[in-house]
Amino acid sequence: MHGWYSDSSYWDNLGRYFKSNGWIWQNPERGYGYIESSEPSWDLNDKECTNQQEKKLIICHSLGLHLIPNPIIDKASHIILINSFSRFIPFGRERRAITIALEGMKKQIGSNTESKMLLKFAKKANKFNVNKVPNTSNFNSGISIEGRGKLRKDLDLLINTSKLPSGFNKEAKVLVVNGESDAIVSDNTKFLLMEELKNHLDKDPVNWILKGEGHFIELTQLINNVMNWLESY
């Protein structure tokens, strides 16, 4: 599941790789732009799957963890979290400044400064991936009216995140992937996620920190390592 002001195209290369290796792949979409929105489901015909039938994997980027329905997370055997968080706004000195910035962004949605604000966010999120901007690639026709409402609603959700989703499976095997130079999610927020996962899960999560990567990580570089991690569990 993609995150805020992003879309399902972020997973295209990863999806092709999984499908070529016999997995059933779903690409849920929030629908901020003009890609039709869709929800994930485990209710699929197992005959479609030629490999790894016993594994139910979800992969989330950023806010995506909080956009997945609880029944999906509850049944996941494996979860990969990319620059994700349990609560977005950290405790401590950063709290006030980040809260004010997010509230300011919310006010600009639907205003004459919306495009400028979203472009600023996109550049910050893609600081280390300037040749590809996955979170704006399918917004060439603009944001849909419905999508604008979702952007505002999901930003509210982001602001109010405070813990792991209630349906988070305690028995799931979890891999946390962080870009070392992520300019969107703070280090304190990422530390808190790891602490909550350790307290919640039956087995401690694995954490990879990638040098030279920001908020939007180049996923093609992860494919082989991700497959090795999946095979080890």
Image: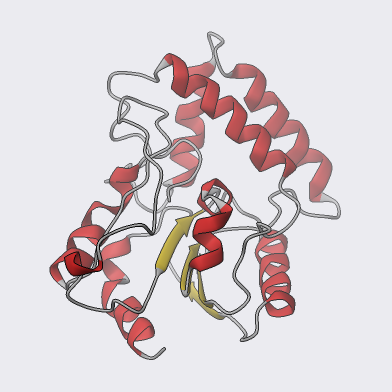
Rendered-image quadrant of the C terminus: bottom left
Q: Residue furthest bottom?
A: 232
> Which residue is located at x 38 percent, y 91 percent?
232
Question: Of residues 123 and 71, which is closer to you in this image?
Answer: 71
Nearer the observer, 40 or 192: 40
Q: From this viewpoint, which residue is outermost toward the top?
A: 112
Q: Residue 57's spot in the image, x, y percent?
A: 40, 68
Q: Position of residue 210 (x, y in %)?
A: 45, 71
Residue 214: in sight, yes or no?
A: no
Q: How many marks?
A: 0
Q: Nearer the viewer, residue 23 or 188?
A: 23
Give left or right: position of 118 versus 16: right
Scheme of image coloration: secondary structure
Residue 110, position as x, y percentages in the image: 54, 13
Q: Is residue 41 visible?
A: yes
Taking the view exactly as shown, the residue that stands out farthest to the left is: 20
Image x and y of residue 143, in percent: 40, 20
Residue at image location 13% in from the left, 68% down from the top: 20
- Residue beneath the point at 58% across and 54% down: 70
Left or right of 157 on screen, residue 44? left
Asked if 12 appears above or below 150 in the picture, the reply is below
Q: Is residue 158 above or below residue 119?
A: below
